[in-house]
Amino acid sequence: MKKTLGSPSRTVTRRTAAVTGLAAALAVAGGLAVAAPASATPPGLSCDTGKHAVDDYTGYALCRNNGSTTQTFWVHLVCGWSPDVDGEHVTLAPGQSGQSTAHCAGLGTGIGEISVRP
């Protein structure tokens, strides 16, 4: 006795639906990891962030304290496949400027996001 698996068009439709569903699930899962919002610069600080000119694994936050009280900040790097890292904590008196740097592990995919933490 020969068993039939159904019509070829129905089989293709099922496979297409399964692949489409899997692709949508992966896109959503990937989007959640990438689309996490960056934290805003702490009040009273004006900051520039970026990657080092010759090293895509090193990021920085250069901040100025425009407020009237002493503030502490640090740079936070999202490093893709490697663990996220924080830079050194920098304390600024009113009117002072300073920089915090951090470095993602070389085995990862590099910096995906740079933010300033209070």
Image: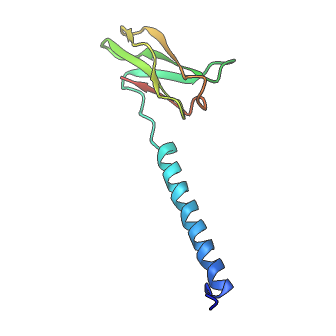
Splitting the image into 4 quarters, where does residue 107 fall?
top right
Residue 99 percent location from the top left of the image: 49, 12
Give the residue displayed 45% in from the left and 42% down from the top.
Answer: 36
Give the residue displayed 47% in from the left and 48% down from the top.
Answer: 32
3 up-or-down from 73: above or below: below
Splitting the image into 4 quarters, where does residue 76 fall?
top left
> Would residue 79 be found to the left or right of residue 2 on screen?
left
Give the residue displayed 58% in from the left and 29% down from the top.
Answer: 108
Residue 98 percent location from the top left of the image: 47, 10
Label count reads 0
Give the residue displayed 41% in from the left and 9% down from the top.
Answer: 95
Q: Residue furthest left?
A: 69
Residue closer to the observer: 115 or 62: 115
> Would residue 88 be found to the left or right of residue 4 on screen?
left
90 up-or-down from 32: above or below: above
Q: Give the quarter of the figure containing the N terminus.
A: bottom right
Q: Residue furthest front?
A: 1
Residue 114 percent location from the top left of the image: 51, 28
Residue closer to the observer: 69 or 87: 87
> Would residue 10 be found to the left or right of residue 85 on screen?
right
22 up-or-down from 32: above or below: below
26 up-or-down from 82: above or below: below
What is the basis of the colouring in this image? rainbow
Q: Give the quarter of the figure containing the C terminus.
A: top left
Residue 34 percent location from the top left of the image: 52, 43
Splitting the image into 4 quarters, where does residue 2 fall?
bottom right
Residue closer to the observer: 31 or 48: 31
